[in-house]
Amino acid sequence: MRLHETPVISNLPLSGGYYMLSLGAPELSTEAKPGQFVHLRIPNIEASSLRRPFSICDAEAGVIKILYKVVGRGTEAMARIAVNETVNVMGPLGNSFPCPVDDKMPLLVAGGYGVAPLYFFAKNSTTKGALFVGGRSEQDILLVEDFTKIGWETYVSTDDGTLGDKGFVTQILDKWQGAHPATKIEIFACGPDPMLAAVDTRAQNWGVEAWLSLDRHMGCGVGACLGCVQKIRRKTNSGTEEYMARVCRDGPIFRANTIVWEE
Amino acid sequence: MKPDLSVNVAGIKMKNPVGVASGTFGYGVEYAELLDLSQLGFITVKGIRKEPCEGNPTPRIWEVPGGMLNAIGLQGPGTEGFIEDYMPFLRTVDVPVIVNIWGTTLNGYVQTAEDLSDVDGIAALEINVSCPNVKEGGSSFGASPKSVFEVVSAVRKTTKLPLITKLAPNVPDIRVFAKAAEEAGSDALAVSNTLPGMAFDIEERRPVLANKTGGLSGSALHPVAVKLVWDAASAVNIPIIGMGGIFEPADAIEFLVAGASAVAVGTANFIDPSTSLRVIDGIEDYMKRHDMDTVSQIAV
Ligand SMILES: Cc1cc2nc3c(=O)[nH]c(=O)nc-3n(C[C@H](O)[C@H](O)[C@H](O)COP(=O)(O)OP(=O)(O)OC[C@H]3O[C@@H](n4cnc5c(N)ncnc54)[C@H](O)[C@@H]3O)c2cc1C
Ligand SMILES: Cc1cc2nc3c(=O)[nH]c(=O)nc-3n(C[C@H](O)[C@H](O)[C@H](O)COP(=O)(O)O)c2cc1C
Ligand code: FES
């Protein structure tokens, strides 16, 4: 983990307020592991603004890519970053997804920009599997063709039915699982909490391993401020205990059946 | 001639007057990969008490114009966990370590200080009587000069370590609180902690922080803290460590001009972890420009 001054190679609009930012970051691109994130200092906003965390969507040939959605002040300013400006990037941060186990089919479950770390994961995975991606509407479904190109099956759902099945992403996951009850699977997921909690329940019910990547508001990004914590259950010599894990340093990826979800 | 940046604050020998503020730098180890910790004047670690503390529910932080609100709620490993898990690393760094302490009762402060008194590698204790984010203890002890006097006196009797009393900004007259701490035997003051604040999600019509209220830090706090340091310096003879919204060397120099003997960088660590190192260089340049040999010459 280091600070990098990275030149902007491109900052391209995709559909519906999503953008892809490419940064020249040779060290980062070799160091980064799927599931890790970077903490960006956004240029051209108030200098005292906090950094913003973003998953690494791709890292190859000296370039890292960030898929982001404009949701507020910081990401609005990001959309205005021009080619050849430089962006200060801290990273790579956090833990990474474990390598998929050879005899299990990896299932990726994504909500919205949750596809970002899963794309990097899929690209680096030797075993191919299936992507289940859900979003509010057609324009919230991204990178599907990119997953197809690298040989992954893809299944889509939208809340409003404008693309794929109408409903939640867990419904298309359930449908698939119902049709392939004998297939050994392992789940990798990134998205909003309710989606992750629903995936967590399924992993436990089906008795399969799942890895869930959490999204929390962050201050430092390095484990110092204790702003981003999540209550996690862990085994001890005498049983189990709950502790406040730092999503930025101990996460963002946690194993299913360890996250203590708030009511 | 190269100016001498070293300072001695309440018996704590610092290479320079720039350290990091409690709660914004973890236990040092979190930032070890990002900067050379040994260049800092001092490291103040996250507030701890005797028992481990889970802290507040999330969301705990919120960005606001000119800074941020936090309501961490003093999550920490307790004195035992701190000594076992973090002191071994801190001993390897050639920097004075200041431990920020708190309690929910007077006795809680005393027991925390007792546990830390004879631990090798601790340079001083900073008594936090000003945390706005815990229901019991914290700022309730800082709310009256009498209780500040009581807490500091009790800790004073417990330990020989230098004591720094960290005061709250939201008091009618900080001079009275500064004097109370001095009379109780505090060797220095830290001014200031965060200012209580609040933000609402207007669509949901509820506070954004799970704790409802939090402490304001960052640029917005800076002029408030400068005045507090100025006022406190007029009332006491013990040294003051100034903090609140230091982002640039000029912000730190302002504290030194107002009467602080040293400064601490807080929120800016999150945004630019090298802020303190930039501030050290900036102070050196300033002293050269003004033909100053020692840091104490900066004070007005
Ligand atoms: C590990 C991790 C990976 C992420 N990866 C991506 C990604 O690949 N693509 C993407 O579009 N977004 C991602 N996010 C979310 C992204 O950080 C926020 O959308 C972004 O910070 C919003 O900033 P803003 O200024 O536009 O929004 P504002 O709402 O104006 O931001 C105000 C404050 O809240 C914080 N904040 C607001 N929403 C979020 C959120 N959902 N998560 C964390 N902090 C938030 C901001 O950082 C800022 O401090 C990720 C978050 C985390 C924690
Ligand atoms: C996330 C966070 C956690 C903090 N935790 C503590 C703490 O444990 N004890 C304490 O005395 N002050 C704590 N503070 C206050 C800082 O030490 C400092 O006094 C304050 O933030 C003002 O400085 P700044 O504006 O440079 O951040 C904390 C501040 C922040 C932002
Ligand atoms: S963001 Fe500071 S501890 Fe995670």
Image (tube, coloured by chain):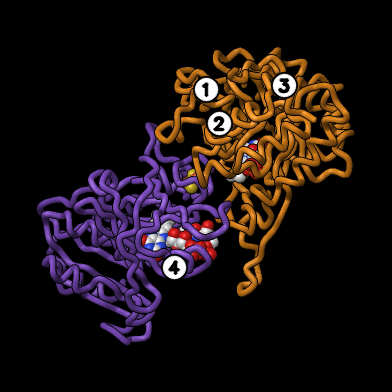
Chain colours: A purple, B orange
Give me the disc on residue A251.
none
Taking A35 as reference, is A145 above or below it? below
The residue beneath circle 3 is B163
Dot in front, 3 or 4: 4
Q: Is mark 1 within 8 Å of ligand 2?
A: no
- Please tell me whether mark 1 sits on a helix, a strand or a loop: helix
Question: What's the residue at 72%, 31% (across, down)?
Answer: B256
The residue beneath circle 4 is A80
Dot in front, 2 or 3: 2
Q: Earlier in the sequence, mark 1 or mark 2?
A: 1
- Please tell me whether mark 2 sits on a helix, a strand or a loop: helix
Of all chains, the one bearing label 3 is B
Dot in front, 1 or 3: 3
**In-image side of A189 versus B26 (left or right):** left
Circle 1 residues within 10 Å: few <14, some 14–19, many ≥20: some
Tell if the residue under mark 3 belongs to the same chain as the one under mark 4.
no
Mark 2 and mark 3 residues within 8 Å of each other at the beta carbon? no
- Please tell me whether mark 4 sits on a helix, a strand or a loop: loop
Question: What's the residue at 17%, 58% (across, down)?
Answer: A123
Dot in front, 1 or 2: 2
**B203 and B4: which one is in front?**
B4
Give me the disc on residue B83.
1
Amino acid on which the number 3 mark rests in the picture? Leu
